[in-house]
Amino acid sequence: MASKKVLEYLDDNRQEHVEQLCDFLRIPSVSSLSEHDEDVRRAGAFVAEELAGLGLKVETIDLGGHPLVYAESELRPDRRTLLFYGHYDVQPVDPLELWTHPPFEPVIEDGILYARGSSDDKGQLYAHFKALEAYVKTGQELPVNVKFIIEGEEECGGHSIYRYTEEHPDKLACDAVVISDTTLYNETTPGICYSLKGLCYMEIKVTGPAMDLHSGSYGGTVRNPGNALAAIVASLTDEDGRCRVPGFYDAVLDLDQEERDGFAALGYTDEILCEETGAPEPWGEKGYTTLERMWARPTCDVNGLVSGYGGEGAKTIIPATALAKVSMRLVPDQDPEAVATAFKEFVLGNAPRGVKVSVEFLHGAKPVLVPRNSPMMQAGMAALEEGFGAKPVFIREGGSIPIVGTFQDCLKSPVLLLGYGLATDNIHSPNEKFLLENFWRGARTTAMLMAEAAKR
Ligand code: BES
Ligand code: ZN
């Protein structure tokens, strides 16, 4: 149990903490767009200042991309050490016209905070900062040593944190890594995540004529890159929702019966899915329930498809090029590089004649699976139960946090995925939001976790 003073401090300062979080959210730290480089830097500086203000020793590390912020408390040998990871960068905001409020001008309506990054991941990360602040400002001794490694390249596939983790495992050495960049099961039930999907992100480019052609003058004489790409995309999956890349399923670890039963017991229905997504009906790989597909089956999806004219009315052309972005979400024990190679061979091996096709691996992430019965899991469960006032359930996630695999390999410490967001927070989408209640409960949970981790 975290001390009463710590929890009271969090209760007494709720409004102020929200205002501070809003200052963080006003910085448009979109890491994938170079026009925002300076903003990303400012968000890193905000993090560094915040942690320095709490008495931590802070370093800003520039490895050529967006800066990493590392911070540590006094490291006492008689205390366990928790390493907190999070990211201060955010996704782009387009399509901007679908936001009901400007994405970097946070507003609160009915206890919900709307802003890009509110849930992914600034709001969740900030809950950790406020938990630490509660110990520091009330003069309560920290139950654990804390380290923070916060990056600004999570959303853009940057390399800084990999390099740093591989080169400085001693610096990041810890008894557990704690990450809040995932979700609760739902608004009333907290969840503890034991698996993340991996990712293999590909780009397919098809080029034909040197310029767009009049589709009357030249139609029927050369291959249309749009048609060719459509054929390639159509070849990637079959009618049963399975990916047709050879060997794609070879390394997939099947769910065990206990997991399947556990998922089924959660009572997630197709009605909930349709309500959450607005889709007319569920769809996906045959033979698996919705939660099984969402959390534990690999997928192959177009993320973007661009060719020719998309404006008002008709324009009669044979487009010169066509482009597809395709992501494959992977599950344990699939390997992103092996999947990328098989994908490339499949697409190039079946490429339509008459156009040039190129395939590029943009970035990847390893899938993650952590044991469900570790002492750290128990600490997380206890903290969530106290913080959210309900027993947590085990969940998996369809999303990826690319650095986690590297933490597991290099630090050899258990990883605790303690999410405070909701699947319905519209992350990566217009009108991203974060429930203030989850922010406050999250801060309490982190405060509790520090105490629980010290006990086990
Ligand atoms: N916070 C998400 C990961 C996540 C998404 C967890 C959904 C739970 C549910 C993270 O910031 C993220 O978006 N990761 C990217 C990684 C990619 C850019 C390599 C993702 O999953 O698309
Ligand atoms: Zn994200």
Image: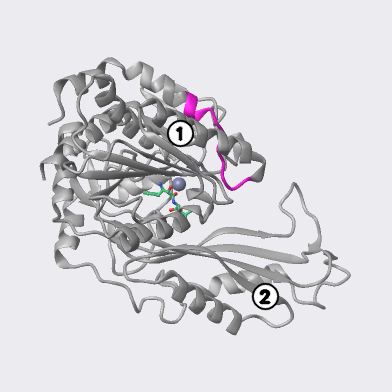
Graded by Cα atoms within 10 Å as few (under 14), some (14 to 19) or many (20 or more), the crowding at tag 1 reads: many
Q: What element does badge 2 sit on?
A: strand
Q: Given the image, on which type of amino acid does mark 1 rest?
A: Ala
Q: Where, quadrant-wise, is the C terminus in this rendering? A: top left
Q: Camera-side residue: 318 or 406? A: 406
Q: Which residue is mark 2?
A: 357
Q: Given the image, on which type of amino acid does mark 2 rest?
A: Val
Report whether residue 109 is seen: no
Look at the image and give the residue range highlighted in magenta: 23-33
Q: Establish if 381 lies above or below 46.
A: below
Question: Alpha carbon of mark 2 to alpha carbon of mark 1: how far?
Answer: 45 Å
Task: Determine the residue positioned at 28% across, 42% down.
Answer: 184
**Residue 198: % across, % down:** 39, 62
Q: Earlier in the sequence, mark 2 or mark 1?
A: 1
Q: Which residue is mark 1?
A: 48
**Residue 181: % across, % down:** 36, 44
